[in-house]
Each structure stands twice: as C-alpha cells, then as structure tokens.
Amino acid sequence: MKLSVFTDEVCRQDPGRALALTAGWGLKHAELRTVRTGRFPLVPDAEIEEFGRQLRGEGLALSGVSPGFFKCPVDDPQVRPLLERELPRACEWARRLGSDLVSCFAFARQEQEEPPAQVIDYLGEMARLAGQQGCRLALENEAVCWGGTGLEAIQLIEQTGATNLSLCWDPGNAARAGSPRPFPDEYRQFAQQVSHLHMKNFDPQAGRWSLMEQGVVDWPGQLAALAAKGYQGFIIVETHLNISPDAFALASPDLSALESNTRRNLEFVRACLPDVL
C-alpha cells in the first residue's frame, strides 16, 4: 500500500508549504482537496496549474482528488451543472495532474429512512461520466450523507451496478455516523471492495475528531488487516484536528497545531506499518 496525506490537512492556507512539509516528511504522494482560494476544481485553472508545478517541484505524485461534490440535497438545482460540467472537469484535471481517482459523496441525508431512487440513478451517472474521462470514482462514506457508514455506502454502490465505482472507506466517518466498531465489524463485510482509505479518528464521548491513536477506530487492527490481504491502494492521512497547541505536545515548535497533529498521525501509521512507502 502507499501512504499519502491531504495537503490541506498539513497547511490549509499555503499549498506550497504543505507540499514542502509533505516531501520533507518522506512521503511520495499527496492528495488534493483545496488550494488557496477554494476547493478543487472550482478555482481558476491557473491555480490548479500552480499546484501541479509545486507538486512536481517537490518530487511528489498525486494520489487522488476530492472535489467534495454531491454533499448537497439530491434535488438541489446545482446537481446538474456539477454532473455535466464540473465532474468532467475534475476528472480531466485529475488525469492532467497524474491520477485517475476521484472521490464523491451520495447527497445530503434527508428525513426518510431510505435514500430516494434518484440517489442511485445519479451515482450511476457519476460513475458513467467519470469512466468516459478515464477515471475511477470512489464513494466516500460520510455521516451527513446517504452512505454514512461503510455498509450503507456499499449498498448504494451495489445498487448502481457500476464497475468503476468503489468504496473510499473512512472508518472515522463511520464512527461519527454511529458505527460502534468500524473495524472489524464493518470492514470484514466489504474488505475486497475498498479502493481508497481516509485515516482519521473520532471520540464519540467528546463528540470530536481525535488523533488516530486515541479515538474509537482500531487503527492498528485496520492497517494490519489491509496489509494481510495485500491491499495495494492508497491510505491517506486526513487529520481533521486543529486544536490549540497546549492540548497535545507539538512535534516541532515550527509547526502549527494542525501540522503537528498530522505529523503525529503519520508517525503513528509508520509505526503500525514500518514498510509503508
């Protein structure tokens, strides 16, 4: 498996600094979500081009892109423009930057117990459009969306029948969605369908994100299980924890709280997987 990190989980204000730190910490890959003025790809082309230059300049490759599309309600008027214009653009830029992996969501969860049929229809259309651009689509389980847990997301994927739609497994999001034991209880039911992995942890008692070593997700067990089955995809640190420096010891006085927490998470992953690249 290959180790990566979201650049905006290193430094949210300065992608150049984020990429320099990422390379300095010995990583070979980075994941793109936001740049200076907003979320990819809803920013000027020149800004994405600059990110690509900085990425290559640090000797890094791209592990994937996270446009954040389709967290809106399924009947939101922005859905069609996102599908018809922005998703193909995200795929085109992902390929230009060196990746064919694009993640997405399954629309904001509504009051009804089951997702409307339109959610499945749109997911199938997303996968078709991504495939036309030569990309794979990974549905991320997200607490505020349909497919909040891994099992719920897998059910949506299976209903589409799309061959290029797989699971971006986020155990931290599953814990936030109410799953008591994302690993092993959920994971063992869809282990072969995971194509991408986001790494963060969640403390249900405090109701907030935590360092990977401290939350409800059994990350040593999850990472060992991935290694045991020969997982070849990316594992991406997505810290989500930007708290005051006095709450945790900083890894370095030159780092912000977010940078320090991300570095600690990277060190934790490397301790679990000494051979990860």
Image (cartoon, grey):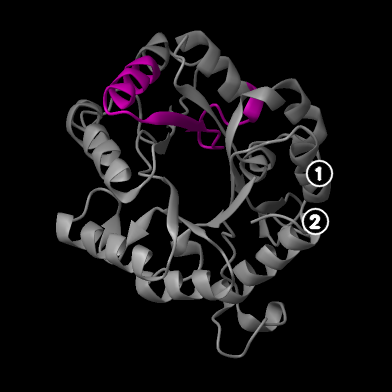
Q: How many marks?
A: 2
Quadrant, the N terminus: top right
Q: What residue is shown at x 22% (from left), y 59% (from top)?
A: 49
| Numbered range of the magenta stretch | 122-151
Look at mark 2 in the image and give the residue it sits on: 272
Q: What residue is shown at x 81% (from left), y 44% (from top)?
A: 224
- Residue 15: x and y in percent read 37, 69
Disc 1 secondary structure class: helix
99 over 241 or under it: above or below = above
Q: Quadrant of residue 222?
A: top right
Q: Badge 2, how many Cα within 10 Å: few under 14, some, many 20+?
A: some
Residue type at numbered disc 1? Ala
**Is 145 part of what is drawn in magenta?**
yes
Residue type at numbered disc 2? Cys
Disc 2 secondary structure class: helix
- Residue 102: x and y in percent read 40, 37
User: Can residue 249 be spotted in the picture?
Assistant: yes
**Is 12 part of what is drawn in magenta?**
no
193 over 85 or under it: above or below = above
The answer to which of marks 2 and 1 sits earlier in the sequence is 1
Q: Are marks 2 and 1 in contact (CB under 8 Å)?
A: yes
**Which mark is drawn over residue 224?**
1
Q: CA distance from mark 2 to mark 1?
A: 8 Å
Outermost residue on the bottom side: it is 253
42 over 247 or under it: above or below = above
